[in-house]
Amino acid sequence: MIKQLLSLLRRSTSALLVLMLLFSLLFTASCTKEKSSNTEAKQRVTIRINDNPVRELTNVWVDIQYVEVKVDTTTRRGDYDDDDDDDDDDKDCDRYGTWDTLKVTPGIYDMLRFRNGLDTMLATGFVSSGTIHKVRITLGNRNEVSKDSGVTRIPLSICNRKPYVYVKLKDKEHTEIVNGEVRIQLDFDIARSISYRNSRYCLQPYIKAYSKNRTGSIEGEVWPRAANAMPMAFNTTDTAYAVPDNEGEFEICGLKPGTYSLRFNPSNNYRDTVLTGIVVKPGEDTELKKVVLRQ
């Protein structure tokens, strides 16, 4: 009787080991198959970035090391609903897709250079064919700000101490296809990304993606320059800022279609001014008449 039980136990243990081995092989094959299929068909991706500024800072230097996109190469899923960014930190392959690295020049970017409709190409390259659901930007530790055009550079720490910045994309809402190339436009909202805590500046990047074909912009000119006015466009669902250039011209991009108000909050004893009823249409620039502020 005892010999029969031992024989049965050995057979059961062997069967369990075989099942575990098969499961491991299937998981590895799944990941390997997905990665290998990625090399068979590629799509070109380009990511551009601009910023929403903040009044008191003249420079915001952000240390960017890597830019990746997460591609779902399968057809079994509908809307992408992976909300757990932490699960992505150390994984190259999971049930939601694979991360592909784009070509980027690692270095320090002054984000306040890319304002008033200006942007720069952040990354580009060929990645696996499939739907792109996320952008992941890896930051370095050489982040700084300045209030005096770079004379004094102030350290800018990362608030949560995590180097990863995630931007979620909705298929066909946040991407555009131009001549077969997937184009992604990012807006780095400096005003929301930087806080002042315990006598120190802290960076918690707030970056959103938008499609130029599905959003609009507000363009204008405000005088005098002595007013140092920062235009703010707002409605019940959206808020965005701009800093006029030396000619007083400004542009606020990436606005969802709708009706906005535009507030000018100046300094040097100039009066606040609010314009209302500004209609923003997708793919169009709404141009305003010159605004002259009074004391």
Image: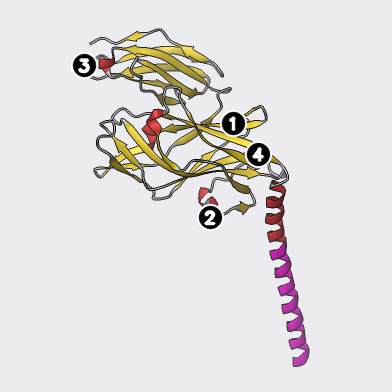
Few, some or many residues within 10 Å of mark 4 (<14, 14–19, 20+) = some
- The amino acid sitting under disc 4 is Thr
Q: Are marks 4 and 3 in contact (CB under 8 Å)?
A: no
Q: CA distance from mark 1 to mark 3?
A: 44 Å
- The amino acid sitting under disc 2 is Asp
Choose mark 1 or mark 3, whichever is in front: 1
For the rendered model, the colour scheme is secondary structure
Q: At 69% across and 65% down in the image, what residue appears?
A: 24
Q: CA distance from mark 2 to mark 3?
A: 52 Å
- The amino acid sitting under disc 3 is Asn
In the picture, the quarter occupied by the C terminus is: top left
Q: Are marks 4 and 2 in contact (CB under 8 Å)?
A: no
Task: State which tag comes first along the sequence, 4 or 3.
Answer: 4
Can residue 246 be seen here? yes
Q: Quadrant of residue 129?
A: top right
Residue sitting at the far front:
105
Highlighted range, magenta: 1-25
- Left or right placement of residue 138 versus residue 153 in this view: right
Residue at the disc numbered 4:
131
Residue at the disc numbered 2:
90
